[in-house]
Amino acid sequence: MNGKYVFRKIIQEEIPSMFSLVLKRIVWMDENNIRQWNVTNYAEAYPENYYYEQYENGNVFVLEEEKTGEIVCAAILQETDKRWNDNVPSIYLHNFVSKVGVKSAGTIFLELCRKICCYAGKAIL
C-alpha cells in the first residue's frame, strides 16, 4: 500500500511487538523531556493484556514495513467510543504509537486511516 508499507489488522503473535513500541516510546519521551505517557502510568493504564482484548474485538491495526514485515506504527481503531456522544459516524483512534526513529510512519498510518474513513463515509476522531 504506499510502496513501502502495508496497513492491516494485527495478528495475535504481534501484540508483544506493539506493546514494545509503546514502552520504547515512553523511554524516548523521558530522554526528550516530553511529559506525556511517561508521567501518566500509561503502560499500567494500557497493559499488554489491553491490546489482546482489543485484538479480540478486531480493533488493532498496524503499519508494517513491506520488505521486513516489521511493525513501525500501530493504533486501536474503534467505530464506537463511550467517551464521545456526538452521533457522528466515526472511527476513533486510540493508543497511536510509532517506532522511534522511523520517519513518516505515523503520517502514513494516519493518512491511510483518513482514506479508509472517507471511503466508509466516517469522520476520524
Image: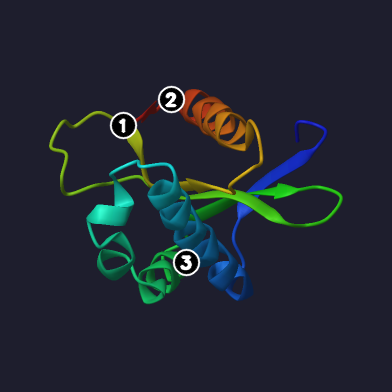
Q: Which mark is residue 11?
A: none
Rendered location of residue 25, percent (x, y): 47, 52
Q: Residue at 48% of width from left, 48% of height from top?
A: 97
Three-letter amino acid code at disc 2? Gly
Q: Earlier in the sequence, mark 1 or mark 2?
A: 1
Q: Which of pointers 3 and 2 indicates the residue nearer the eye?
A: 3
Q: Residue at 47% of width from left, 29% of height from top?
A: 117
Q: How is the image coloured?
A: rainbow
Cα–Cα span, label 1 and label 2: 7 Å
Q: Are marks 1 and 2 in contact (CB under 8 Å)?
A: yes
Cα–Cα span, label 3 and label 1: 22 Å
Q: Secondary structure at mark 2?
A: loop
Q: Are marks 3 and 2 in contact (CB under 8 Å)?
A: no
Query: Which sits in the foreground, 80 or 93?
Result: 93
Three-letter amino acid code at disc 1? Pro
Q: Which mark is residue 121?
A: 2
Q: Are marks 3 and 1 in contact (CB under 8 Å)?
A: no
Rendered location of residue 114, percent (x, y): 50, 27
Q: Which mark is residue 55?
A: 3
